[in-house]
Every structure is written in C-alpha cells, then in structure tokens.
Image: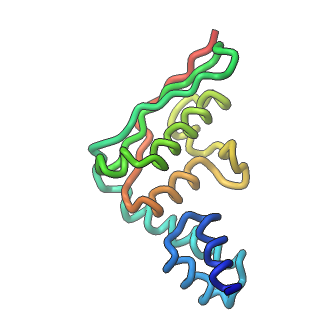
Amino acid sequence: MKNLETIRKLRSFCGASIASCKKALEDSGGDFDAAVRALRKEGVEIARRKSSRETHAGVVDSYVHGDRRLGAIIVVKTETDFVARNEEFQSLAHEFAMQVAATSPKNIEEFLRQPFIKDPQKTVEDHMKEAISKFGENIEIIQFMRLEL
C-alpha cells in the first residue's frame, strides 16, 4: 500500500506515467529524490528526441494582470490538435503567458533560461521538457508579446 502511495505522489510531482514512476522507484531502491532525478533525466532525453518533430497545432493564450495595466500574449505549438485541445496543455500555455507578464523577457532564448515562476528550482525550459515528456509531443514557444500601460 505504501508503495502505491509513493508512486501516486511521484506521479503527481513529476507528471510521469505510473509505469515510469514505478520503474524509477524500483531502480532507485525506493529513494523518492533519486526517482525524481531519474524521471527528470528521462524527460530531458525524451524532449531531445522529440525536438526535431514539426509542430502543426497549438494555442494562443493570454494573461492580464488584475489591475488590467499589464498583460501578455503567447503562441505555444505542439504536434497535434489532440494535445492542443487538452486542458493541461492549455494551462501550460497560460502559465507561460503569466511568466512573460511577470518577467518581461527580451526573446525566447532568455525566456527559456529564466527560473520558472511557479517553481524557481527549475527553468522554463525544464518545465517545458517535463511537459514534452508528459504529452509525448514536441512543444515550441513561437512568439510572445508583453504589454504594459
């Protein structure tokens, strides 16, 4: 029972499949932190393999700050409409729009290198690679714009 709870916790934390979480825990001898590191490493490798695949679908998302004086709009693409319509993918695009509004990056390269606002222990690129691993499709940020009064 405890093992199943640990697998669920790891899945919730990393977003990886149950089978991947189980294998990572088995390979790490039950060490949660080692399993997280292994899953992140696996996610980076998956993202690297998928990075050359073309993106044909995606979403345009926006974020407007509560005082309505600051906003951002972003274009995030993926390979299929199936993933683009997924609520979690759309949430990812919204998080990226919030990131643009909060940090005002000059270009996509700078944006990807920034600490992710919801988890400063990782970069935006790390977060995107985790999503690529989770969705099984390449994800690209095509463009963004930040607007402020």
Of residues 115 and 9, the one nearer the viewer is: 9
Picture layout, residue 11 above or below residue 146: below
Along the horizontal axis of the image, is 86 left or right of 2? left
Image quarter of the C terminus: top right
Picture layout, residue 107 above or below residue 128: above
Q: Quadrant of residue 63?
A: top right
Image quarter of the N terminus: bottom right
- Residue at x 68%, y 21% (from the top left corner): 66
Q: Extreme front residue here?
A: 1
Of residues 30 and 126, the one nearer the viewer is: 30
- Residue at x 57%, y 53% (from the top left corner): 127
- Residue at x 40%, y 36% (from the top left corner): 142
Residue 133: x %, y % from top left = 46, 63
Along the horizontal axis of the image, is 34 left or right of 39? right
Residue 40: x %, y % from top left = 58, 68
Q: Quadrant of residue 116?
A: top right
Picture layout, residue 4 above or below residue 46: below
